[in-house]
Image: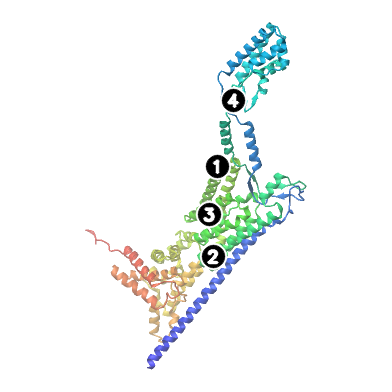
Amino acid sequence: MKKIELFGRRLTIGFEKKEKIQKETKDMELSAKEVVNEKVVYLILILVITVISANTYLFSNGHLKLGDVARRDVIAPTDIIYNDRAAKERIISEILENSRKEYISVDNVERQTILRIENFFEQIKKNKNLDSDLAYSKINNSFNIEISSKLFIYLYEKSNDELDDLKDKYLRDIKTLYKQGVKKDGNVLRLNNLFEMIEDLDFYEESFVRAFIKPNYILDSEKTEELLNEKIEQVKNVSVRIKAGSIILKKGEVVSESKVVILKNAGLYGRTSKVIKFMGTLIYLFILSIIFKNICTKFMFNEIRKKSYYSAIMLSLAVGIISSRVIDPNWKYILPIETVFILLGILVNIKTSLIIGGFLILYAIPLNGFSIEYLVIEIFSLIISLYLITKIKNRTNIINTGIYIGMTKVFIVLTMAVGMNIEFVDSLIKSGVLFLSGAFSGMLTIALLPYFERTFNILTDIKLLELGDLSQPLLRRLSVSAPGTFHHSMMVATLSEQATEAIGGNHVLARVASYYHDIGKMKRPQFYVENQADGVNPHNNLSPSLSTLIITSHTKDGDEMGREYNLPKEIRDIMYEHQGTTLLAYFYNKAKQSNPHLEESDFRYSGPKPRSKESAVIMLADSIEAAVRSLDEKTPVTIEKMLRKIIGSKVEEQQLSDADLTFKEIEIIIQSFTKILMSIHHVRIKYPGQK
């Protein structure tokens, strides 16, 4: 019963311990969430305060209204683009006034008019024997026209020869008018302009022509209206652009109706307009900040939690938004905001660059007058930046990335210029500025990247790739001073890189760290078996304690060399961790033969144990590579058996207890190691004649 009770107690104790661990873990998670939330709030405060500080202009310049006199110069706070309705109406009025009208041609009008005039003059001649009043009444009724009595008396008193001369002149002039076209618009006969073409036109001839002439072109009102409507529909909105920093009103200038339109579009007209714009900006920032906080805490929890990453994010974001705030609005497009995108993509990851870069653009929109043009250009810049960052392999690629970003911005702005009917010259100048901005962002990134790497202790893939160049001085020195160790490091790198990639770790870090993990052996290369080419082992003449001291010191020696050559801390940590607290069993057992009371800890590496997947994989690869070389028969069965034995011993010794490795990942590592080692140590086929 006691055993059962004791066993039950142990179970109870174990359960209580588990509860305690779970509670501590939960408390740590809650604490981490609070810390992350607090850090995100700091980011939001930087962004919001910077943006709001730029809106103080809304409460400056007083509350101008129509007819007021400006007490100081009123400056456009941002680019202002608006549609000028008055200008559009003026264009339509000009079209209505100057538009060509459509007329219907009337046949035989000229011939009929000429016959009537000839007949009229004949009737005057025939009725000269009558009283003038009687002749006037008779002729008027006969031709159904109204000729003034003054004109009739003028003609009636002429002799026949004089009448013939007048008839010829009148007919000649009327033919001239018909040749030009006699047009009638509704009830209006348009003759005034035509009369200017007649020489020696007097009152009597003008009266005569007006009485007899008929239009040979009559206005087609339906077709004319249809054409006018087509032209009016083609009239586009007149887009007026006022650059940021331009003077809208000069001191002492009266606020006219045209200025009121500009002030309204700038949000500077009247108290109500200013308050509405300011409140709209606050609401926009409030909603944006809520979204930003939720996205950061959900998708960037680990990045914000890590101090080095958070510091880089905060500095980049602060510099980006403050630069957008203080730069002259006329030069906003030359600001290399893409530097933030590229830096964060390289220093942290693409996800961080997308989130922080996207929200930086959104927070900067109020600083640019909610410009759709700015939003479109920067969104496309962010997208192309994210794509190009994945292609960066060295610092030279960063320059190319900046150039490609500049070219993308040029393409976008020219496309928008065509679509929005923006003046080509302005668009061309802006294109040049945008290209310089993109190119400058690449150069600025190269200049800032080393400072960010060193200041915040961030190891980037670019830095790793540069350190992985075998022409690096330290690696060249290793290949000459300790060629066996160099070859061993290359083999460990091959094993580590493939296995780390298989379990989702940083395979670049694993490969490069493997190159450097044993550089401490250069100090005394002959004391390590892989460098003992002549078969002489110096340890045969040394005490086990001294041999242990020499062997274990290579981790510390490596760290010192790494500091001398400015190797990153992550790589120097792996120099210590790849041996963990492993026991040098051979020297311990040898020393114990002469002194059974020795402390085992004196024959162990100082540690610490591996604290990352990459470090743990390198530890396993380091142990396995040397052990497999000692196998006489290298088959898949013997290699895998050796692997499981070595890895099993590491697990039993709790060397992997601090590394974030699961049993599933360990199995993947074993399979990866087996596959690579078999490809390296494949059985060679003997050909005829070979020994």
Which residue type carries mark 3? Leu
Residue appearing at x 58%, y 54% in the figure: 337
Residue appearing at x 62%, y 42% in the figure: 238
Which residue type carries mark 2? Asn
Residue at the spot of label 2 = 294
Q: Sequence-wise, which precedes: disc 2 or disc 3?
A: 2
Q: Return the mark for residue 418.
A: 1
Mark 3 or 1, closer to the camera: 1
**Quadrant location of the C terminus in the rendered image:** bottom left
Q: Sequence-wise, which precedes: disc 3 or disc 1?
A: 3
Q: Where is residue 52 in the image (x, y as percent from the top left)?
A: 65, 59
**Quadrant location of the N terminus in the rendered image:** bottom left
The local crowd at label 1, few if under 14, some if 14 to 19, many if 20 or more residues have their Cα within 10 Å, is few
Count of numbered labels shown in the rendering: 4
Q: Sequence-wise, which precedes: disc 1 or disc 2?
A: 2
Which residue type carries mark 4? Ile
In whole angstroms, how far apart are the C-alphas of marks 4 and 3?
A: 63 Å
Residue at the spot of label 4 = 218
Q: Sequence-wise, which precedes: disc 4 or disc 3?
A: 4
Is residue 17 among the parts visible in the rendering? yes
User: Would you identify the image quadrant in which residue 233 lies?
Assistant: top right
Mark 2 or 3, closer to the camera: 2
